[in-house]
Image (cartoon, grey):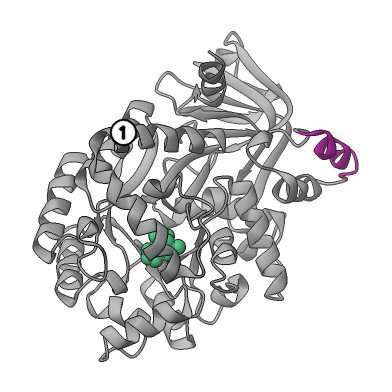
Amino acid sequence: MRVVAGQMLSFIDDPAIVGEERSYRFFDRGAVAIDDGGQIAWSGPLADLPDDWRRTAITDHGRSLILPGFIDAHLHFPQYRMIAAYGADLLDWLNRYTFVEEQRYGDPALAAQAAHAFLDELVRNGVTACLAFSTVHPEALDALFGEAERRNMAVISGKTMMDCNAPRGLSDTPESGYLRSKELIARWHGRGRLQYAISPRFAVTSSEAQLEATGALKREHPDLVLQTHLSENKAEIEAVARVFPWSCDYTDVYDRYGLLSERAFFAHGIHLSERELARLSETGAAIAHCPTSNNFLGSGLFGYRHAREATRPVSVAIGSDIGGGTSFSMLATLRDAYVVSQLAGARISAFDAFYLATLGNARLLHIDHEIGSLDPGRFADLVVLDPEATPVMAARHALSASLHDVLFALIIMGDDRAVAETYVAGRPMKSVLATADNA
Ligand code: GUN
Ligand code: ZN
């Protein structure tokens, strides 16, 4: 049992829908009481801490902000160290670096070491849950899930399915992709805090037979999340049109195999037509916006407000897309989301940004009953942010006159240095990493 105190911020609803004032709870001196199961028993103003908790030791983070841990809705575990690869565009970058690196993950020892380093990096950045791609190799997913289970982290992932236009060492077949997925679902889904995600890489690397098998998996396991990529890059869109000449557009390819649903996540979705946006809206499917990746690969400017237009609103999640993305930090990711929104001519606020990376992502992943807010009953997955983490941040912070100002400076200037602590199911994790690093 533990009580964590500090400034406290938690979202109740989407600021874009209910308005900023009604979207969050903030306490200048707040507290979160955590039970032995790692769940939040109570949260509110420290002065109102129930008597039962007053004898429990308080970990006081002072003027730092306690928020629900960040959720990254799209990234690639096997790309954790191939960040910053100098590719011309998506397809060049995939062929030249990504497919080469991912082939190494058939080695269980390498995958185990990578899983350790990858989850350490998430913790360092205050990311306590994610929807992640793995590789085609079941061994890689075993390594990731095994390490996440040891840490009691909420990781959603699956074996990548890809059976064409990729190196042999990174390819399965429609049959083996289906069968290995079934075995892994049986082994891992629902174990601890882990969830399996059906994971066809994208239409370019899956044959019609594989997409058919993916549709069968989805019908047989309707509760599972599905993740893939959609409409990221012009050459990719042209390739899909060539391989699936019967399709009316890229979204239609996935649609024909029954892959659109309110548990489906389509990374990027930058160049979608009105028809495609309307179809995503109708089916409740989400776009995972990955701004640092889109900027890095020159993929294009995603129109957040345009996607969410009230006449046919599309759900939008946010992700780093490591290693196309350039930072594990959700603060850096939100900064690029802000910058892209500026360039697209429809600005988002810091409240929009923090909502997306916490409750917004949790809702779209259908795990908001477990994480995404500081309400009782949720796991105590917390990130503690220090708005004065560096000298220049401290100087800037002195000028902040409102909560929005504080949050905005955090996303524009912050990175892992601003993460003072990360708690996973009530256990401090980042300070433990720091101790191990110095040992
Ligand atoms: N499309 C298919 N695979 C990938 C990938 O690994 N990264 C990105 N950014 N886009 C993809
Ligand atoms: Zn991706």
User: Residue 88: x and y, percent?
Assistant: 51, 69
Q: Between 269 and 378, which is closer to the camera in this rendering? A: 269
Q: In the image, is residue 2 above or below residue 152? A: above
Query: Looking at the rendering, which quadrant does residue 32 occupy?
Result: top right
Residue shown at 63% from the left, 37% from the top: 416
User: Residue 396: x and y, percent?
Assistant: 86, 42
The answer to whether 48 appears left or right of 264 in the picture is right
Q: Does the magenta stretch include residue 214?
A: no
Residue shown at 58% from the left, 45% from the top: 329
Residue shown at 22% from the left, 49% from the top: 137
Name the residue that disc number 1 marks. 112
Say which amino acid is labelled 1.
Answer: Ala
Helix, strand or loop: magenta stretch: helix
User: Residue 155: x and y, percent?
Assistant: 37, 42
Q: Between 409 and 143, which is closer to the camera in this rendering? A: 143
Query: Looking at the rendering, which quadrant does residue 69 occupy?
Result: top right
Query: Looking at the rendering, which quadrant does residue 434 occupy?
Result: top right
Mark 1: C-beta under 8 Å from nearest atom of ligand 1: no
The answer to whether 388 appears left or right of 137 in the picture is right
Q: Between 249 and 108, which is closer to the camera in this rendering? A: 108
Residue shown at 57% from the left, 62% from the top: 296
Q: Is residue 393 magenta?
A: yes
User: Residue 24: x and y, percent?
Assistant: 65, 48
Query: How many other residues sit within 10 Å of disc 1, few (<14), some (14-19) or many (≥20)?
Result: many
What span is in magenta? 390-400
